[in-house]
Amino acid sequence: MDMYIQPEYEVVRREDRCIACRVCERQCANLVHSFDPETGKMQADDSKCVNCHRCVCLCPTHALKIVKSDDTYRQNANWDGQTINEVYKQANAGGVLLSSMGNPKPFPVFWDKMLVNASQVTNPPIDPLREPMETQLYLGKRTVKIERDERGRIKNTLPPQLKLSAPIMFSAMSYGSISYNAHEALARAAEELGIYYNTGEGGLHKDFYKYGKNTIVQVASGRFGVFKDYLETAAAIEIKMGQGAKPGIGGHLPGAKISADVSETRMIPEGVDAISPAPHHDIYSIEDLRQLVYSLKEATEYKKPVIVKIAAVHNVAAIASGIARSGADIIAIDGYRGGTGAAPTRIRDNVGIPVELALAEVDARLREEGIRDEVSIVVGGSVRSSADVVKAIALGADACYIGTAALLALGCHLCRTCHEGKCNWGIATQRPDLVKRLNPDIGYKRLVNLVTAWNHEIQEMMGGMGINSVEALRGNRLMLRGIGLTDTELRILGIKYAGESL
Amino acid sequence: MLLKEGQFRNPSGCAVTGVIDRSGKSMSGEGMIEAISVMHDRSNGLGGGFAGYGIYPHYKDFYAFHLFYDGNTARADTEKFLTRHFEIVYSSEIQTRKIPSVKDEPLIFRYFLAPLPQKLANSHLDEREYVARCVNRVNAGIEGAYVFSCGKDMGIFKGVGYPEDIGRFYRLEEYEGYAWTCHGRYPTNTPGWWGGAHPFGLLDFSVVHNGEISSYDANRRYIEMFGYKCTLQTDTEVITYIIDYLVRKQGLSLEETAHVIAASFWRTIREKEEETREQETLLRRMFPSLLVTGPFSIILGFTGGLMALNDRLKLRSVVCAEKGDKCYIASEESAIRRIEPDLDRVFSPAGGEPVIFKLYDQQGGRA
């Protein structure tokens, strides 16, 4: 450890409560805690602590807490402690800084600057406990020309669509970046909920082919794990062009996380860093994307929708318009707050735009061009609650991807050190002793609970607005009002300010 | 300055009623005036109107345009435009009667028009689309002019006032038609403009609506992709465009259209027999953004018939009745009883269940 850098957090142990049972020591993969046989007491090395709260949660006598260190540099509004520490780190090691999970910087969260409408007097709110309240929807193209058979019945000319019981899916998290047990929990939850989870770019473990009907498989720039059975088993195929946490770069899975199993699933050597390139080397332009979309459709006989996932960047509306004309069935837009198992810090914290603005622009652009039916829009990065989902749909999304929220349901404490592979919660690790801490039987149930709870809340909010189908909420921007926003922000979001009436 | 209708969104409560004689026999507008007057308390004097079908038998092959003009400049501009695009077969001011409670009426004119054949051919448009676009150009482009009726052998009559007063203002007892609809408006805002009253019409479709739909902006933003402009920002306008899009442009039947607008709940669809289930599921998957939620009851008038439709939860009242060849639709049964106390059958259609009454000679195909 760099001598210049002082621990960010301190482990506080109440001696009157500690019984030296050494649970904390056994639980900490970062080796913070140790037992001193001479004093018979527990000790802690603060410098190793990532504040994942594993020890705090498991301490049987509640003797532990982690506090932010009050040790400080001389106060400086320009050079804050974090910035100074990062300079020290780089001066010491000469490398690119790595981080995990989403952008933690205090940028505005536009979800929190939008308020939702409710019915009063002139039309009635609807009680979801007493009346049907539909959150079921289909994702995919809806471009149709009515054709009839000889008996005059409308023919099913619709392209393949995905049926969702709720407007929520688990976003792409690869096996490798997260554990086998985490994947099992996601897959089983998706199946029980009637939604989908996403393999990420890590291939699909052979044990999980049985969840294929609820699986979206990803084809990313490294093409890890992509082969015939992989495509065929899936409900949909996602081409990952970019990721909100790290727009413009590829993926990086450290060799330490590449176990035998991960190696087999990804079809890459064991223990060697898996680095997927920044671009797809067969896609240098929009017309190349079209070729990959149709290659995948040919390979799967046009039976599966193809999703194209992009990071929210400055020109996102034009890019989405191009994608909508390239055969894709669904566009997934990932905002700059989206999570990741590993990303260069500078990119995570400085590249990309908020998904709320990207979504508003994309939806408006596709409608202006009359091609909104060509694609469904799914947004993620970051959707934190059912209220965010409702606002996203009212802005124009068809459904949302949740990643971080799903990991939180599995026990993640957002310590943002996934890239180190020592996740004490058994999520972002491949160490068998750590992985087994995540019980998929419990994990999947917690995911089911989370989505079920959100779905109830979505229904409550929809009912309040007098809307009884999520389809009638989609793009219904009059249901939103802005608060604390500038005229420019209101214009981009396409909403009125709170207090402005209809 | 008071904003004009269209410059703000104006939801309203309302009374609606309609009548059709399926044998095609004509009746005057008097009955409708009678019926709506019973529901006086469902309007607040800020809008009333009527649509009559079969009222122009002598000009039934021509598009009957009814226009409001703010003044003679607007009229001159409009007539210049109409002359460029249509043969004007007949034009005159619409005869009205002074009623003390009906004030500030604009100039109200009627024209019977036929598209100029050469113009129409050059436009490469279907005749009805050509007419619809011309209407749009007048309404969007000529300041102070507004086409509020443009179908064949039908006409809309509307204004600011209680509907029974508006009916007498237009001397509707002098018109004879096989079907009539009527609307009394209870807006929650104060429009001073006659164009904002209802029925809303597009070609031979006319819609009267009672309700405040919660899906408005989702519907509006979707339908505007197909060349419609929701300039009035009313529910009635967007519902009319949806019906026009589904029926005229996509070729759906009225029943199919009802299954899009007021689709059955998924769980209801699941219980239907296979063929119906498949068709209704397809319609919902094809046009999910045209689902209309929130309370509404509408009466759609079209050449040869009327359709009543409620929202799928039936959050607004609508009652239908039959007596011999005549069929009645109204927000309240009392309105029907006022003009026909002795009915063969009275029923309340379920939410989302369309009730379609057609002329006998038109059954089996939509005009």
Image (cartoon, grey):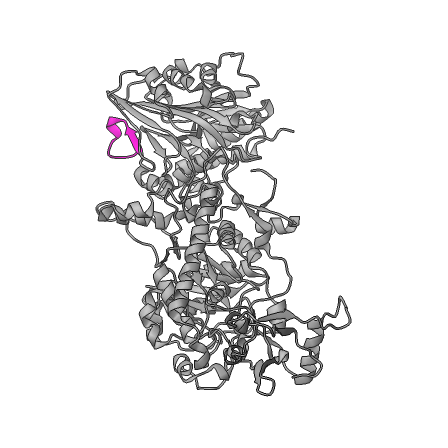
- Among the 4 quarters of the image, the one containing residue A179: bottom left
Image-based side of B261 in relation to A250, left or right: left
Relative height, residue B140 to residue B328 (above, below): below
Relative height, residue A402 to residue A299 (above, below): above
Is residue A417 at all visible to an observer of this figure? yes
Residue B153 on the magenta segment: no
Residue at x 58%, y 51% (from the top left corner): A493
Highlighted magenta segment, given as a residue range:
B355-367
Residue at x 56%, y 47% (from the top left corner): A115
Residue B261, position as x, y percentages in the image: 38, 41
The one nearer the camera, A134 or B27, is A134
- Among the 4 quarters of the image, the one containing residue B6: top right
Residue B325, position as x, y percentages in the image: 25, 21
Image-based side of B206 in relation to B20, left or right: right
Residue A482, position as x, y percentages in the image: 60, 47
Image-based side of B28 in relation to A48, left or right: left
